[in-house]
Image (tube, rainbow, N blue to C red):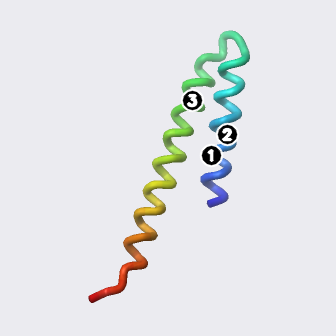
């Protein structure tokens, strides 16, 4: 969970810097890609955890 929070914090920081500073549009796009990667990471982790918790029949 800490890794997800670090990714999320970096993504938000890059998005804010890219939106505020003139000429830093590439930071905005990197931040958005990092945000998408963090959400995908969280989804993959939650799906893999839910599969492990099922009782075997």
Residue at left 45%, top 55%?
Answer: 43
Measuring from the top left, give residue 51's x and y in whole percent.
Answer: 37, 72
Reading the image, the residue beneath label 1 is 7
Q: Residue furthest left?
A: 57
Q: Are the residues at dot 1 and dot 2 in contact (C-beta closer than 8 Å)? A: yes
Question: In this rendering, would 38 be left or right of 57?
Answer: right
Q: CA distance from mark 2 to mark 3?
A: 10 Å
Viewer-proximal residue among 9 and 54: 54
Q: CA distance from mark 1 to mark 3?
A: 12 Å
Reading the image, the residue beneath label 2 is 10
Reading the image, the residue beneath label 3 is 30
What is the count of numbered marks?
Answer: 3
Q: Earlier in the sequence, mark 1 or mark 3?
A: 1
Measuring from the top left, give residue 44's x and y in whole percent.
Answer: 43, 57
Element marked by disc 2: helix
User: In the rendered view of the protein, which quadrant contains the N terminus?
Assistant: bottom right
Counting other residues with Cα less than 10 Å from the Cα at mark 2, is it few (<14), some (14-19), or many (20 or more)? some
Q: Earlier in the sequence, mark 2 or mark 3?
A: 2
Q: Residue furthest top?
A: 22
Q: Residue furthest bottom?
A: 57
Viewer-proximal residue among 55 and 2: 55
Vertical arrangement, residue 44 with respect to residue 8, above or below: below
Q: Quadrant of residue 27?
A: top right
Residue at left 57%, top 29%?
Answer: 30
Q: CA distance from mark 1 to mark 2?
A: 5 Å
Element marked by disc 1: helix
Measuring from the top left, give residue 50's x and y in whole percent.
Answer: 42, 70
Counting other residues with Cα less than 10 Å from the Cα at mark 3, is it few (<14), some (14-19), or many (20 or more)? some
């Amino acid at each position: 969970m800490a890794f997800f929070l670090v990714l999320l914090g970096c993504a938000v920081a890059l998005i804010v810097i890219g939106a505020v500073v003139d000429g830093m549009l590439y930071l905005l796009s990197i931040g958005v890609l990092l945000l998408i990667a963090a959400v995908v990471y969280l989804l993959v982790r939650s799906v893999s955890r839910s599969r492990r918790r099922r009782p075997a029949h």
